[in-house]
Image: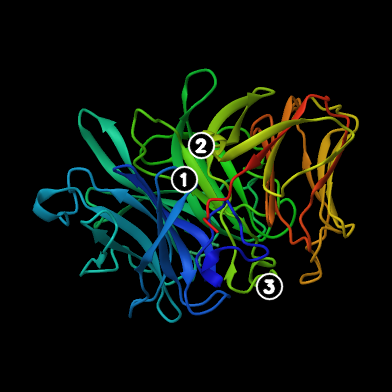
Amino acid sequence: DEKSFDEQFRPQYHFSPPQQWMNDPNGMVYLDGEYHLFYQHYPDSNVWGPMHWGHAVSKDLLHWEHLPIALYPDSLGYIFSGSAVIDHGNTTGLGENGKDPMVAIYTYHHDKDGQSQGIAFSNDKGRSWTKYSDNPVLKSPGIPDFRDPKVSWYDQGNGKGKWIMTLAVKDKISFYSSPNLIDWTHESDFNPEWAAYGGVWECPDLFPLEASNGEEKWVLLVSINPGGPNGGSATQYFTGNFDGQQFTTEGQKVKWIDYGADDYAGVTWSNIPKEDGRRLFIGWMSNWQYATIVPTTAWRSAMTLPRELELVSVEGDDRLASRPIRETKGLRSSSESIQGPTHQLKAPLFELELTKANHEKASLTLSNELGEKVVFKIDGDQLAFDRSSSGKTDFEAGFGNLHTAPLSGVDIKSLRVFADRSSLEFFINDGELVMTEIIFPNAPYLKLDFEGFNENAKVHYLASIWDH
Ligand code: FRU
């Protein structure tokens, strides 16, 4: 039964679509106790096709309720990636009885007419959607890549403000502003020559965060495909300032939110209450290099664990840390301490906590009874992840390539690893350096070998979010 969510590689505590194809997370917004997650979805096949927005809600970002498809393609085009906001003050006038509507801002992709931006609104907490009658609100300038609007409210003080749209335009970011989500004015462009270009820029996000010295900094996420540090798709980020019109950055170093191969097109939730204050992120846990041919059939691909983004200072540089959300602790069913160098695990869904690694040489190997394995290594000034013998790998020539990440001044104090049926997420120092990797083992990895880590390691077995 494809709806039991019990297929061989089906994630047990990561979000995946009930069936068929999924790519980018879209329109993440919080409202009245619910986290909404929309996603790029093709309901008629397990490969990419005419895009819809699938939809799910959760109270804790881990247990998801699948809802009916929110947005269908229409005569203006497929529904590509975008964002959603709560229109506080009903600036659009689309709220019922003066209430604040939920508004989705997305890209229309049309093979002939190019890409433009449209909006749709909901007055019932995202359960039903109406497209705005005068779409598109931002017309195509006649170029093929003009997409993925991420919209947020920019507070100018004294009760004034405006909507800011961050848009990917070929290989630059363009900022637009609007009083009402309908009329848009171009403000500026961003494309420093030292950034990572390799491919087209996609799925940007712009938000403020408090730096470690207490100052407010702005962060700009830009996904690129191809051109990632380990091949294919990946997300770079910039830190700097945004003055309501223009983004400026300090430093000239390319920085990646995740050095693994499988965290793409991630953006953050809007409308998180002030009392919570977190900047919550989720990414698509795949890579365009092989996303359409990974060995699953009933559904294709999953999301990363949700993560809380924070700025940390490493060697005087602002780095973006991605911490597993604290709600993951609620998945822990039982825990045991593990004594190295070898440990037999009791179940395949787990989180490992290891402390202090030997920088010259530390490694962690997970393997199964078939001799399939993955190796995660700390080797001098770099991390390496080897999935060349991880199980099914031959569906794509580059899938088994070695992935590396420079440590760049990060002093390893801890390592957390989250294992699900077809993914591993490695968080150094609770997310100062991250590698997210998908795998397709023919049997669960239940043997752990480690060396060069302190002996007081722990394993927490995690509960499935599905009732089998
Ligand atoms: C990123 C992306 C977006 C686009 C969507 C189409 O993975 O290419 O730029 O909106 O996927 O599905």
Q: Along the polypeptide, which appears first: circle 1 or circle 3?
A: 1
Mark 1 and mark 3: span between their CA atoms?
28 Å
Q: Along the polypeptide, which appears first: circle 3 or circle 2?
A: 3
- Neighbor class of circle 1 (other Cα within 10 Å; few <14, some 14-19, many 20+) is many
The residue singled out by tag 1 in the image is 61
The residue singled out by tag 2 in the image is 327
The picture places residue 107, in percent across and down from the top left corner, at: 40, 65
Name the residue type under label 2: Glu
The C terminus lies in which quarter of the figure?
A: bottom right
Mark 3 and mark 2: span between their CA atoms?
32 Å
- Neighbor class of circle 3 (other Cα within 10 Å; few <14, some 14-19, many 20+) is some
Q: Quadrant of residue 277?
A: top left
The residue singled out by tag 3 in the image is 293
Name the residue type under label 1: Leu
Q: Quadrant of residue 321?
A: top right
The residue nearer to you, when weighing 52 against 181, is: 52
